[in-house]
Amino acid sequence: MATNNPPASSAPGQLPRPSLSQTVDVETPELVVLSYTVAGVGSRATAAFIDYAICIATFIAVIVALLQLQVKFGVAASRDSSGAWVMALLGVIQFAILWLYYVLFEALGDGQTPGKRIMKLRVVKDGGLSVTFEASAIRNIVRAIDLQPIFLYAVGLVTIMANARGKRLGDMAAGTIVVKEDLVSQPVTPRKTARTDARTPLPLSASLTDAEFQLLDRFVERRMQFDPERRTQLAAGLAQRFSAKLTQDPAQLPIAQLVRLHDAELAARAQGAAARNDTGAARERHRIVATNAPRWALFANTLKSAQGAGLSTLGEAGVRRFVQDYREMTADLARLRTATRGQDSADLFYLNRLVAGAHSLLYRRGTFTLRRLVAFLFADVPAEVRASGLPIAIAATLLFGPMVIAARAVITHPSVAATLLPQGMLARAAKGVDDAKRGKGYIEDPEVYRPMMASQIATNNVQVTFVAFAGGMTAGLLTCWALVMNGVSIGAALGLYISKGIGSLIFSFIAPHGVLELTAIVLAGAAGLLLASGMLLPGNRTRRAALVHRGGRAFRLLAGAVFLLLFAGAIEGFVSPNATLSLQTKLAVSATSAVVLAIYLFYKGPANARPATARPATARPATARPAP
């Protein structure tokens, strides 16, 4: 659950200053509760600004580099296909910067983009584990909704401020949170050396309670900020309150007596003395800190090194030692939590940060491999398609139903086309009558532009599927709207060409890539509906858990859609507009793609035997294997 806890002060044994920071508690496999500080809007906005600046600078650098290549080698799109290939490459790079920058950096950088690293932020799973590629992809694809309207991020900002975990819609769907990583790497030591006689035996308990010491500590720390008159008044009041604990020396001013008492209390706590009135486990609190602070400081330095360079730099023996120390630290944290009895303290905050950092490092997900990608695409995705019959059927109905209705309406009443289609499509259909007589295709097909067309078509279609998926976070309304409008648009265009007697012209263009592209649209729509079902129909799970679970399933459908669109885009760019190919040839391409698609989705070979809903194995610490 989320709580509002204050951050650490700079010395042990002192309560931290109040803060508006939000924290979220998670329980580790070691049954220890860790508290993470949720990143605020300001730090996240700054990190986003840095990342945007990097993206813009990268895109400008790519454009400049490509222009230099064109000048150097004399490449021009108007003369040969080389320029078209350059433009195709530019389109792919633009798409990668827009959509893959965050996903790749977060997945491969353990939850940190360059902006987040500078701001000391990290994306982690709700359980404190490292973010996975799937979770990163989900949270960043849903960014299409969070950044609305336009690129103002109003939706994301509202949702971040409206929930205790600081989640935008993408974080809700992916089951992630953005946390601060302000790890203290210096040893826990007092701010000053107390002026007490080392030969004086340590009392069993300090003279002040923690609340009294906090009050005294704040006065001593800030006393020089007050004007002399105000300082004298405050010192007199505190001296009267603590009169029974002060050394009654007439030669000393009240403020000097208060400083002496403060130093004695600070030294007692640093050496492990219990606070006054503490009983039971609470008496152990300062002794736990005094005994273990040096070991915590050494572990902090090791952790800082491992976070920067990776566990592999520690060597196998170092990793085993690190894991052993981590387990001892979790035990210390559990004891200290019990001793503090739910109260916040600088020591608890400090130790929690150490354990949380080590926990994220040890339970980091495995390295992404080509084998895992192949298993995902050819086993998990087809299995999920077979398991998601209902949302797929609904999505298909929302797409093909309006398509048939619109086509029939336009064929029956051609004037309806002006209401359903843009003027450009109407003009193209009018021109298509003459093109059909002259043996031309559906669109102009300058061969040199085919690479650029394939790139633009593929990236545009993929972005459309992303919007359909992200639309699930609008309770499915945007997804349904996208499916219906696509169906109406395609159906009206088909009806318009049929009504003019040139249906073969548009069929010859759609046929080669249509099977793959329409299947991809249905899968993307089903992904959005599946995501929406987690919000609306959670079943036996909590709404939050159902959203995350179905978000993972929906991502597999979306991945299948994107996979199909890569092939559909290539066919649409190179084969569909080719007027030299006969309708029979294009229908043969369509039939072949349908057969291959059916085998891909429904053949349950050994590679496709794993069920799509299988949950990943529970993460284990690094002692289960040699150092990576």
Image (tube, grey):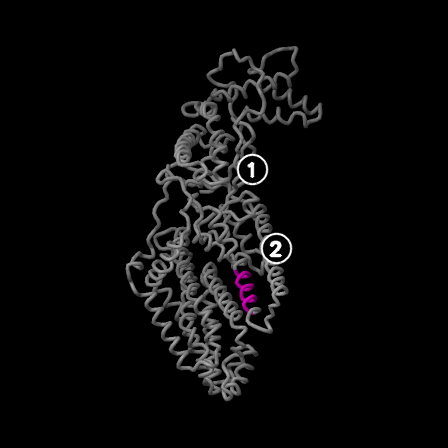
Above or below, 280 against 95 in this view is above
What is the span of residues highlighted in magenta in the rendered image?
A: 84-95
Sequence-wise first label, 1 or 2? 1
Distance from the alpha carbon under mark 1 to that under mark 2: 37 Å
What is the x, y in percent for residue 250? 64, 10
**Secondary structure category for the residue under label 1:** loop
**Secondary structure category for the residue under label 2:** helix
- Residue 32's tag is none
Viewer-proximal residue among 223 and 462: 462
- Reply yes or no: does residue 471 show up in magenta: no
Determine the residue located farthest toward the front in the rendered image: 73
Q: Quadrant of the C terminus?
A: top left
Q: Residue at label 1?
A: 19
Q: Is residue 329 left or right of residue 610?
A: right
Q: Name the residue type under label 2.
A: Ala
Dot 1 alpha-carbon crowd within 10 angstroms: few under 14, some 14 to 19, many 20 or more? few
Above or below, 34 against 596 in this view is above
Q: Is residue 156 left or right of residue 487?
A: right
